[in-house]
Image (spheres, helix red, strand yellow):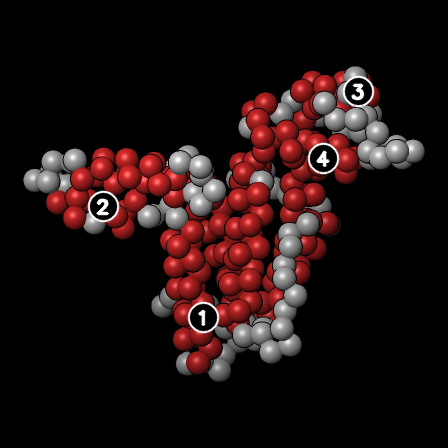
Amino acid sequence: MADNQAGRGRAMTADDIAHQALELADTRGLEKLTVRSLANRLGIGTMTLYGYFRSKEEILDAVADLALGSLALPKAAPDERPRDAIEAVARAFRRLMSAHPSIVQILSSRVTTSARARRGAMEAVIDRLVTSGIPGPLAVQCYGFILIHALGFSSYQGPRAWAQDDAEDRAELHRQQSHFYASLPIADFPRLVELREAIVELPSEGQFAFAVESLAHLVEARLAGSSTDGSGPLIG
């Protein structure tokens, strides 16, 4: 149970509560995050918690605001290339969603409009892409691609422990999954049997990096072959 004081001699703040809510959702699952369970974790009454947030929806908004607002972008080099910026942004979003799996669910089910989230996960990110030399409209497309890909990939990898680098029994789970594909009827699934090792790697970080690398290559080709403002679809 968390102490109902954020620090010695300091009153609890809404951010302190959001931190505890995020930790609860990450460790026990978003469905376990309720006003009552959070109040119990904080060591306060539910009515006290309602003094900070009027509903679970407001708590979820605060959690999303906290996580997105703290998106950790590494410092850019003075001569950062578009490719470098794309990779830095993609890694930052992937780290965030890997560290806080509940954020994937939250962002997939609600719209976050707070100023802090917009600064940390939109303004700073798009500015990083534009500053690297990507024209504004194209930078926005890159931002959308990276965010949507990170959300989708994180959702896909979540239940597939054999591809998670920090899984304790990753090697054994990987072996079992490969064996599953190897045991399929080859007359019905010849490609799945043949390519089983590559298929098992679909939820791996290498697959995430492949998509990001493909985006970077496409953007480089677009910039090398055009003097326009970068507007229009990435492909076509």
The amino acid type found where label 2 is placed reads Arg
As measured in the structure, the alpha-carbon distance from the residue carrying label 3 to the one carrying label 1 is 52 Å
Q: Is residue 1 left or right of residue 179?
A: right
Q: Amino acid at mark 4?
A: Ala
Q: CA distance from mark 2 to mark 4?
A: 42 Å
Label 4: element kind: helix
Q: Give the quarter of the figure containing the N terminus.
A: top right
Residue 231 appears anywhere in the view: no
Q: Residues within 10 Å of mark 2 (few under 14, many from 20)?
A: some
Q: Is residue 107 above or below residue 212?
A: above
Q: Is residue 223 above or below residue 117?
A: below
- Front: mark 1 or 4: 4
Q: Earlier in the sequence, mark 2 or mark 4?
A: 4
Q: Nearer the viewer, mark 3 or mark 1?
A: 3
Quick one: label 1 or label 4, which is nearer the N terminus? Answer: 4
From the viewer's side, name the closer residue of 92 and 216.
92
Q: Which residue is mark 4?
A: 18
Q: Which residue is mark 3?
A: 44
User: Pointer 4: residues within 10 angstroms few (<14), some, or many (20+)?
Assistant: many
**Residue 167 is at least partly visible in this image:** yes
Residue 233, image x, y percentages: 43, 65
Residue 101 occupies which quadrant of the picture?
top right
Nearest-to-viewer mark from 3 and 2: 2
